[in-house]
């Protein structure tokens, strides 16, 4: 059987004090390939800590984290960074696009660090932009794109590396309601094509788009068995 994309085993994080701050209490979690998981909670609940651990941006102080079967706690910094670059695509609330680079160039830049040959970088970038409906805007500068289009470029940049996991942190936070719905529709389409999604949000309407919802409050991660509890 293929291992879970994400597997947390009594994973926790406490920041040293005084006094110590428990950011994430021990939790167990499995996310399988092709799932669309949303994680909802108020500010200060532990969402960012959860994202940083799953994104290999921070180390848990207890337990284990396996990504695609790799025990990340056993990896040195260089190997962790390489695994993160190969396996995880990030989409943030801020688009983080270089304003004087075209959409195509912004997407290609994300592949430079993976040492992918230039010709393949261009092909992958075009493919990713086409996948998010921007195949006709490859030469556009971010300043000429709408907010929704810029977020689509950011999603294309994350997809170009062909990650196992797309990790989205408040991906609609800077968008109006109509544009946010379009971006969420796109994420649903990508999930239908087999992309594994974890979306961090404080917005219950966004959380309801997932096929599986987790709640986090005061560092405690729990599963919502019934999506109706989000209403």
Image (cartoon, rainbow, N blue to C red):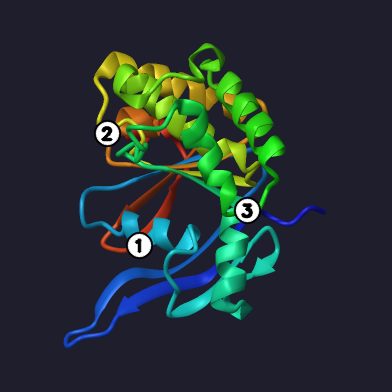
Residue at 36% in and 30% down: 206
**Closer-to-camera residue (215/206):** 206
Location of residue 197 in the rendering, given as x and y in whole percent from the top left corner = 54, 40
Residue 120 vertical placement versus 188 (above, below):
below
Within 10 Å of the Cα at label 3, are there few (<14), some (14-19), or many (20+) other Cα atoms?
Answer: few
In the image, is 11 to the left or to the right of 50? right
Tell me the distance, in whole angstroms, between the alpha carbons under discs 1 and 3. Answer: 26 Å
Contact (Cβ within 8 Å) of mark 2 with mark 3: no
**Closer-to-camera residue (79/110):** 110
In the image, is 147 to the left or to the right of 89? left
Residue hosting label 2: 173
- Looking at the rendered image, the quarter that the N terminus falls into is bottom right
Within 10 Å of the Cα at label 1, are there few (<14), some (14-19), or many (20+) other Cα atoms?
Answer: many
Task: Examine the image and state in which quarter residue 67 appears.
Answer: bottom right
Identify the mark nearer the N-term, 1 or 2: 1
Local SS, label 2: loop
Location of residue 162 in the rendering, given as x and y in whole percent from the top left corner = 65, 41
Task: Examine the image and state in which quarter residue 176 appears.
Answer: top left
Task: Examine the image and state in which quarter residue 96 appears.
Answer: top left
The residue positioned farthest toward the right in the image shown = 1
Location of residue 213 in the rendering, given as x and y in whole percent from the top left corner = 45, 41
Residue hosting label 1: 49
Local SS, label 3: loop
Residue hosting label 3: 114
């Amino acid at each position: 059987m293929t291992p879970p994309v994400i597997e947390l085993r009594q994973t926790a994080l406490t920041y040293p004090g005084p006094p110590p701050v428990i950011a994430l209490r021990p939790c167990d979690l499995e996310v399988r390939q092709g799932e669309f998981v949303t994680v909802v909670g108020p500010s200060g609940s532990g969402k960012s800590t959860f994202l940083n651990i799953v994104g290999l941006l921070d180390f848990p102080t207890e337990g284990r984290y396996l990504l695609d079967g790799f025990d990340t706690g056993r990896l040195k910094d260089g190997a962790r960074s390489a695994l993160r670059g190969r396996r995880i695509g990030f989409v943030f609330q801020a688009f983080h696009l270089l304003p004087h680079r075209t959409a195509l160039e912004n997407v290609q830049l994300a592949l430079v660090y993976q040492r992918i040959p230039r010709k393949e970088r261009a092909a992958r970038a075009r493919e990713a932009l086409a996948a998010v409906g921007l195949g006709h805007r490859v030469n556009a500068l971010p300043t000429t794109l709408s907010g929704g289009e810029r977020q689509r470029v950011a999603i294309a940049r994350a997809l170009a590396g062909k990650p196992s996991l797309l990790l989205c942190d408040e991906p609609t936070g800077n968008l109006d309601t109509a544009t946010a719905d379009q971006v969420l529709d796109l994420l649903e389409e990508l999930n239908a094509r087999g992309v594994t999604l974890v979306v961090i949000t404080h917005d219950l309407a966004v959380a309801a788009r997932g096929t599986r919802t987790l709640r986090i409050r005061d560092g405690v991660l729990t599963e919502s068995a019934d999506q109706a509890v989000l209403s």
